[in-house]
Amino acid sequence: MEIEIATIGGYEEVGRQMTAVRAGEDIVIFDMGLNLSKVLIHDNVETEKMHSLDLIDMGAIPDDRVMSELEGDVQAIVPTHGHLDHIAAIPKLAHRYDAPIVATPFTIELVRQQIQDEGKFQVDNDLVKMNAGGTMAIGDSEQVELEFVNVAHSVIDAINPVLHTPEGAVVYGLDKRMDHSPVIGDPIDMDRFREIGREGEGVLCYIEDCTNAGRKGRTPSESVAREHLHDVMRSVEDYDGGIVATTFSSHIARVSSLVEFAREIGRQPVLLGRSMEKYSGTAERLDFVDFPGDLGMYGHRKSVDRTFKRIMKEGKENYLPIVTGHQGEPRAMLTRMGRGETPYELDDGDKVIFSARVIPEPTNEGQRYQSEQLLRMQGARIYDDIHVSGHLREEGHYTMLDALQPQHVIPAHQNLEGLAPYVDLCRSQGYKLDRDLHVTENGNVFQLVE
């Protein structure tokens, strides 16, 4: 069976992931994401009102016109998890393909919301739920099968999809960490990865996220971040002024820890910001998390400001606002607080807890720096880097290569500089550039099996 891979987006940067695999006459697309930094550098860009071609020209979403080079029919669009760099281009591109969108329940619900917010295109693709551990036949030949393998990441309900073909498995490895004690959900299913590496024809190709490939050791578990956060929260429990926390809105495990620890130190948690309300509200509706019944979630600007007024009236010492803005996004709650654009007044000594790292990209780094400086100018004390990454470090990558023993490897999710440490690791394990180790660019198509 002919096997072709199109590396469409995410092979020259962090963001706008999209890859297509053709097995015979059947094609499966993995991810359709957004490069958020290409949007943030413009003022007041509303992507839901923009045409796909304009977003492609901006470098914000994948240029999928290379799909015309693949001779076959798209049978499924498979987002791996709910982060915007993996799902946010679905409303702009999915309608071009007569294929269902197949994902885990939490991811499918986030995709549904993305589609509902779309203002330019009508997206009528079927939305199909499949849990981790599930399988689905692809096409009519009964020779190709899609499988979801459970992984741990910084958003719940994440999977690595595997496309089983007569020539071996294609494992799409974006994004994960090797977490054996996650706060929410099941550990990474290493037993299944090892089985896939040794059954049938083994692994034909492994496509891997290289975000942290240059960092030594292994990525700690989310349970380590939870203990770090707990320690920080207990260290400020006697402070009688304002404490504000921020983290990734999609990081439900971290949000739930913040909510729990706020209660422990005698403060009422409240979630503020549109994406905070969206992700946590969705997770609660789908029973991934059991928040206290009186937990407030407010996304609209007026309701957020009313909540800030209530906090100021009743006393900042009684509340822990958990807000958007950990990357310094211009319209996020924390950024507005730093600019003095909300009713919440920061005083000398007030604490701001960043339970997140800045994404290593110039736009994010600049905006985060500016946000922190604005907060410091108002007297805030910054507690930074209370976080663990959602991506594998060097030893996690070594373990995955050992488990899967792939015939071919394709590094992804980084620029050339970021790919280099993973390339070095693969070469140390016997892979050779342009033979079985393929460093590629966006828009390339190459054939693994003729």
Image (cartoon, grey):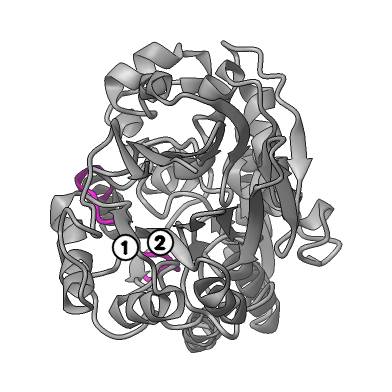
- Above or below 40: residue 142: below
What residue is drawn where x is 73% and y is 49%?
136
Looking at this view, is 207 or 343 the one in front? 207
Label 2, residues with CA under 10 Å away: few <14, some 14-19, many ≥20? some
Lateral position of residue 368 relative to residue 182, left or right: left
Q: Residue furthest right?
A: 293
- Above or below 246: residue 383: below
- Above or below 25: residue 190: below
Looking at this view, is 432 or 159 the one in front? 432
Query: Do the residues under discs 1 and 2 have CB atoms within 8 angstroms?
Result: yes
Q: Position of residue 354 (x, y in %)?
A: 41, 66
| Helix, strand or loop status at disc 1 | loop
Q: Image quarter for residue 76? A: top right
Residue 34 visible to an observer of this rendering: yes
Looking at this view, is 54 or 363 the one in front? 54
Residue 317 visible to an observer of this rendering: no
Residue 204 part of the magenta segment: no
Looking at this view, is 383 or 112 the one in front? 112
> Given the image, on which type of amino acid does mark 2 rest?
Asp
Lateral position of residue 382 relative to residue 306, left or right: left
| Helix, strand or loop status at disc 2 | loop
Q: Which residue is mark 2?
A: 347
Q: Position of residue 254 (x, y in %)?
A: 57, 69
Label 1, residues with CA under 10 Å away: few <14, some 14-19, many ≥20? some
What residue is drawn where x is 31% and y is 55%?
410
What residue is drawn where x is 64% and y is 24%?
117
Q: Which label was assigned to residue 379?
A: 1
What residue is drawn where x is 69% and y is 72%?
185
> Given the image, on which type of amino acid does mark 1 rest?
Gly
Q: Position of residue 230 (x, y in %)?
A: 54, 85
* Magenta segment boundaries in residue numbering: 348-364
